Image (spheres, helix red, strand yellow):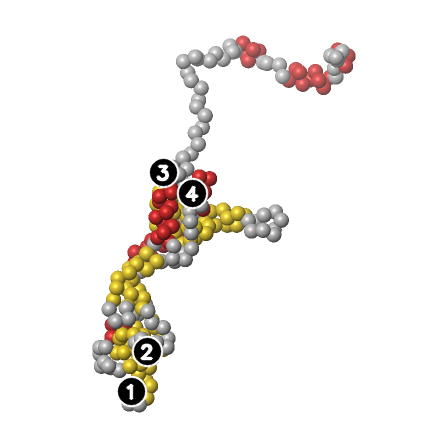
Amino acid sequence: MFPSVSAVSESDLDVQEGLELSPAEALEPAPVLDPGVAEAPAAQEKPQVARWYAVQVASSCEKKVKATLEQRAVTLGVDSRILEIEIPQTPGMKLKKDGSRQSIEEKVFPGYVLVRMVLDEDTMMAVRSTPNVINFVGAEDRRATGKARGHIKPRPLSRDEVGRIFKRAAEKKPVVKVDLAEGDQILVTAGPFKDFQGEVIEVSGERSKLKALLSIFGRETPVELEFSQISKQN
């Protein structure tokens, strides 16, 4: 039911008077829309940017995960969003039992694969469901109960992190990987102690050297040797 005139207070009238147009505003013509001018388009979503993510994988399965994920990305139709899969490696050298050397590729971060991808539900599922993948490296969203482990939210690597990783792979000096350990018996095959036998007491792969106890003049003497100067005894 509408209020009577007497029910309208002076404050209500003041509000109504404040809403009235001024004479100049009342004379202004109402705006007319030009049919030839289209309305401004809605703001478009920003395109998603591909970032590098670290993925933890089962031990010694880096190459297998890389090959499988590359194939699955094509099969699942996400190869336009999973762009690169890398295993940062550096050249190395493996010393065989007979003293010969074999060129190898040494992993910079064993147990991890780097993936450059646009992160969304489809690409996350493609990575997580790949055999031998453990999970993304990221922050754990804890559950409300606090009892069970939460969901891992992938954390993109920063530009500095990516730069350091690949720079390390490119500049790292070759490491000699030798099938030797403390207590192994060796035979010196070159140098001033040729034909001496001894026991390994220290191995330094980065320096390509080891220390062994050799019997010199009836006394066990520690001697530093190059990997190329010895062979491992069975």
- Near mark 1 (Cα within 10 A), the count class, few <14, some 14-19 or many ≥20, is few
Badge 4 is on which residue?
A: 126
The numbered mark, 1 or 4, whose residue comes first in the sequence reads 4
Residue at image position (69%, 17%) is 14
Quadrant where the C terminus is found in the figure: bottom left
Give me the disc on residue 80. Answer: 3
* Residue identifier under label 2: 185
| Mark 2 and mark 4: Cα distance apart in space | 49 Å
Q: Tell me how many marks there are.
A: 4
Q: Earlier in the sequence, mark 3 or mark 2?
A: 3
Vertical relation: 72 (above or below) 199: above
- Tell me the distance, in whole angstroms, between the alpha carbons under discs 1 and 3: 66 Å
At label 2, which amino acid type do we have? Answer: Gln
Residue sitting at 44 percent across and 32 percent down? 45
Looking at numbered disc 4 in the image, what kind of residue is underneath it? Ala
Amino acid at circle 3:
Ser
Callout 2 environment at 10 Å: few (<14), some (14 to 19), or many (20+)?
some
- Left/right placement of residue 217 relative to residue 78 reads left
Q: Name which residue lies at 41% across and 41% down.
A: 118
The answer to whether residue 33 is seen in the rendering is: yes
Pointer 4 with pointer 3, Cβ within 8 A: no
Residue at numbered disc 1: 216
Q: Residue furthest right?
A: 6
Q: Which picture quadrant has residue 129?
A: top left
Residue 220 image point, x, y percent:
33, 86
**Badge 3: residue crowd in 10 Å (few <14, some 14–19, many ≥20):** few
Task: Check contact, mark 2 vs mark 4: CB within 8 A.
Answer: no
Kind of residue indicated by mark 1: Ile
Image quadrant where residue 23 sits: top right
What x and y, as percent, mark residue 229? 25, 75
* Mark 4 or mark 3: whose residue is earlier in sequence: 3
